[in-house]
Image (cartoon, rainbow, N blue to C red):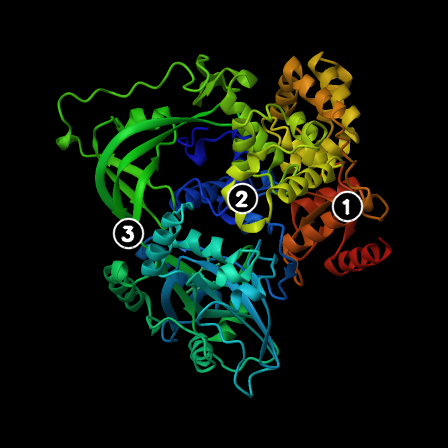
Amino acid sequence: MSRAQSVADLTRAEAADELDALAREIAAHDAAYYQDDAPIITDAEYDALRQRNLDIEARFPDLKRDDSPSERVGAAPVQGFAKVTHAVAMLSLANAFDGADVDDFIQRVRKFLTLDAGQDLKLTSEPKIDGLSASLRYENGVLVRGATRGDGRVGENITENLKTVSGIPHKLPDGVPEIVEVRGEVYMSASDFTALNDRQKAAGKSEFANPRNAAAGSLRQLDPAITATRPLRFFAYAWGEMSDLPAQTQSGMVALFAAWGFDVNSDFRVCDGTDDLLAHWRDIEARRARLGYDVDGMVYKVDALDYQNRLGFVSRAPRWAIAHKFPAEQATTVLLDIDIQVGRTGALTPVAKLQEVTVGGVRVSNATLHNADEIARKDIRIGDTVVVQRAGDVIPQIVRVETDARRPDVQRFTFPTHCPVCGSPTARDLREDGEADIVIRCTGGLSCSAQVRERLKHFVSRPALDIEGLGNKQIEDLWAAGLVRMPDDIFMLRARYGDNPPDFWRYTSGAREKIGTLKDSVVKLFDAIDQRRDVALDRFIFGLGIRHVGETTARILARHFKTLEGFQAGGAALAQEDAETREGLEAIDGVGTTLILALQQFFAAAENRAILDALVAAGVSPSPVGEAETSGALAGKTIVFTGTLETVSRAEAKVRAEMLGARVAGSVSAKTDIVVAGPGAGSKRKKAEELGLTILDEKGWLKLSEQTSEQT
Ligand code: IVH
């Protein structure tokens, strides 16, 4: 999708489409970052996506989606660890990119607090560590629980792993408050990272892309003994629930953390205003490469806790703090080659193969090139000297070509006209406005082995079928061994090889660590596959990888069609241009023409219909969704929240409503059942009154939701 267009020029329809695309795109990047620890784009690019989403929402507030990325932080927790609901949510930070942004921040804070020029406002300044945040709960001075941030509301219980991290005391001194939750960043130092990667390499294991990923991978080990072998550290910088606040300032709290035995950052300062903050920022930025650990900026926080309290939070970040980012680190190297990767939907993604270079302490040999237009725009040619940058992220970008250094014989890069994997012609899609899309695709569909493999990976992935022990690596192995070609083959493995398991498992390196003997592991895999025969229909539909069908849409479709047979029949009818089916879909809130077209195209292809039939024949029988929720008073109801909620966040209210089977919509219509209106509710409340809908205040809503959850 082209993001060249200024937000001010977008039509409503374009804005809606783009918000839809952004929601999906950002969710995919969140999953890659938080669940797979393998980000696909740079932090800067990710921030730009989020910013664009916010900008479009600011211009078209009523188009804000239920699943808007601006309502979420990170991704849901992965399986394998018990879930922990944070007593106080773990939030994120807003970003400042230059001095003017910092100044704006301070002015906003002063205005909010109605401070006049003579009144002093102290701020703390400290490095923003590029690691993972963790929350440590102490009861009567004893560490009882440690958790990851997860999606900010619910994280994973990784207590045993956190106990192996240096800088985290297991016991606090006498006299600390009864309940103490200390929060901070788990990270790996640059030298420990290099040493770990050398060990990984020597052991024939895959290396980590950067210290952050190494820390994440180490912390998420199901076996704490493995975590213990990984040199992790911790800096304390924040807190969650506290039965008693033992200090009045941020700096006072951090000093106490140090006194209690936590590591705190030695570059922590209390500053007096913008100039002071910026001087500290410049000092650390100059010493950045020598700090010995990755930082991606500075964090400024209002020092006085009573001010922090008054300032409070806006959606996912506190009003009293901001992250002031450092510019990306750069280096010069040579572009050796351009690889073309083929994705699930056939999209061709160019990847730069670079002569290895160290950028900000990390060895780099690949960079993303995004798409053909990007290569043409930057006139990137194989053999060129290029400037690469990384901004605390994994896959670096090519910033520009040093054209002065270009040898006269280097050729312009021509994007392949045929798929490098299957040889089918490549093409650009036509967008709704008739323009050619930026993405170039292989037209081979299921005759392209790359597309088939990527679709299989998506099918078994966590948000889809979620088959334990069957990840990307195993799919590649099964494919290479010729055991799996189509999704139904997965469900036929036991029938075909149950008595005599093939030894594909010995190729899967990661499994060796976790699972004992070969045979056990295969049996375990077959069991895991069998367990997913009755996967929830929404996961199943999502797993099919139909374009424009994200998790939310899949849930809507699953609720609408109820059963797999219903979905198949509906899809087939749609492919036959059946008006009734089409109208049925159009009537659903959240279903648009793009989606209907995508469904129609999916079912028009005989090969896709055959896949569904084969899955049914292989004994896959997805279960209807929302059974548990169909009983309560809120099941199937559409709720709109408007105005300010005082006791819970909008996000929390939404999650709660959804848990009770309701759907949360962004705008009021005749399809709305309940409007929860807080102070400041305007046009939505008015519309609800005109339509004669049920209107509740926050108290009424809390009462209703509590009653409902007791019943269900
Ligand atoms: S304060 C409520 N301080 O940055 C505010 N965060 O982008 C809590 N981070 O989730 C955050 N260093 O993982 C804070 N010195 C620091 C930090 C820091 C790194 C991370 C943290 C947070 C993320 C927000």
Position of 517 with respect to 351 (left or right) is: right
Q: Of 236 and 107, which appears nearest the observer?
A: 236
Q: CA distance from mark 3 to mark 2?
A: 25 Å
- Residue 259 circle label: none
Q: Label 3, on which residue?
A: 360
Is label 3 in contact with label 2 (beta carbons under 8 Å)?
A: no
Q: CA distance from mark 2 to mark 1?
A: 24 Å
Tell me if I can see residue 120 in this picture: yes
Residue lying at 25% horizontally and 64% vertically, measured from the top left: 283
Q: Label 1, on which residue?
A: 661
Q: Label 2, on which residue?
A: 31
Tell me if I can see residue 72 in this picture: no
- 410 vs 320: above or below: above
Q: Nearer the viewer, mark 2 or mark 1?
A: 2
**Ligand 1 has an atom within 8 Å of the beta carbon of the residue at disc 2:** no
Amino acid type of the residue tagged 3 in the rendering: Gly
Residue lying at 58% horizontally and 34% vertically, measured from the top left: 503
Q: CA distance from mark 3 to mark 1?
A: 48 Å
Position of 267 with respect to 514 (left or right) is: left
Q: If you read the primary sequence from the N terminus, does the residue marked by circle 3 or circle 2 appear first?
A: 2
Q: Of 108 and 95, which appears nearest the observer?
A: 95
- 92 vs 205: above or below: below
- 397 vs 545: above or below: below
Q: Of 619 and 240, which appears nearest the observer?
A: 619
Residue lying at 69% horizontally and 30% vertically, measured from the top left: 491
Q: Secondary structure at mark 3?
A: loop
Task: Tell which quarter ligand 1 is in.
Answer: bottom left
